[in-house]
């Protein structure tokens, strides 16, 4: 499937259904298939949100640390989304 289709399916699972396991699988599929995709940093961000929501903040931090795009600043900080966690 094209990256944009996988990304769309993942965001639908996340936003419309709050189906975090499906969203996690879709985001990981896209990143595994094409880690340099134009959607990669967005996937890492939303994957981190899903991981936090499923009780895996340490893994979420790993994905957040992989974000490379400076334009990523337009996304809301995690604290603005009501998500608080501490890194080790």
Image: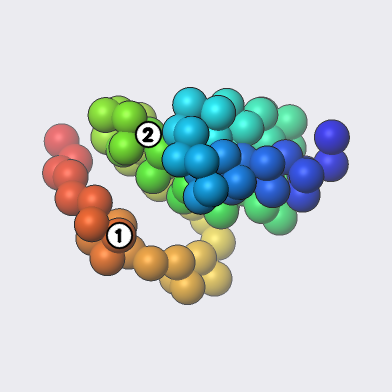
Residue 72 percent location from the top left of the image: 50, 65
Label 2 sits on residue: 51
Helix, strand or loop at disc 2? helix
78 or 37: which is nearer to us? 78
Residue at x-position 48% and y-position 34%:
19
Q: CA distance from mark 2 to mark 1?
A: 14 Å
The image quadrant that residue 86 belongs to is top left
Can the viewer see residue 36? no
Residue 72 in view of the camera? yes
Give left or right: position of 19 versus 10: left
Residue named by callout 1: 81
- Viewed as shown, does residue 55 lie left or right of 25? left
Name the residue at 84% across, 35% down: 1
| Residue 55 vertical placement versus 63 (above, below) | above
User: Alpha-carbon neighbours of circle 2 within 10 Å: few (<14), some, or many (≥20)?
Assistant: many
Closer-to-camera residue (42/53): 53
Give percent across and percent down for residue 39.
Answer: 66, 52
Q: Position of residue 87 (x, y in %)?
A: 19, 41
Q: Measuring 15% from the left and 36% from the top, which residue is drawn there?
A: 88
* 80 w.r.t. 51: above or below: below
Left or right placement of residue 86 versus residue 31 in this view: left
Upstream in sequence: badge 2 or badge 1 = 2
Q: Which mark is residue 54?
A: none
Residue furthest toward the right?
A: 1
């Amino acid at each position: 499937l094209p990256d944009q289709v996988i990304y769309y399916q993942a965001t639908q699972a996340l936003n419309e259904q709050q189906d975090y396991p499906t969203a996690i699988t879709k985001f990981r599929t896209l990143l595994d298939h094409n880690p340099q995709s134009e959607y990669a940093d967005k996937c890492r961000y939303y994957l981190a949100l899903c991981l936090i929501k499923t009780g895996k903040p340490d893994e979420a931090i790993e994905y957040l640390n992989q974000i490379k795009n400076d334009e990523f600043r337009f996304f809301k900080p995690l604290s603005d989304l009501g998500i608080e966690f501490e890194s080790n």
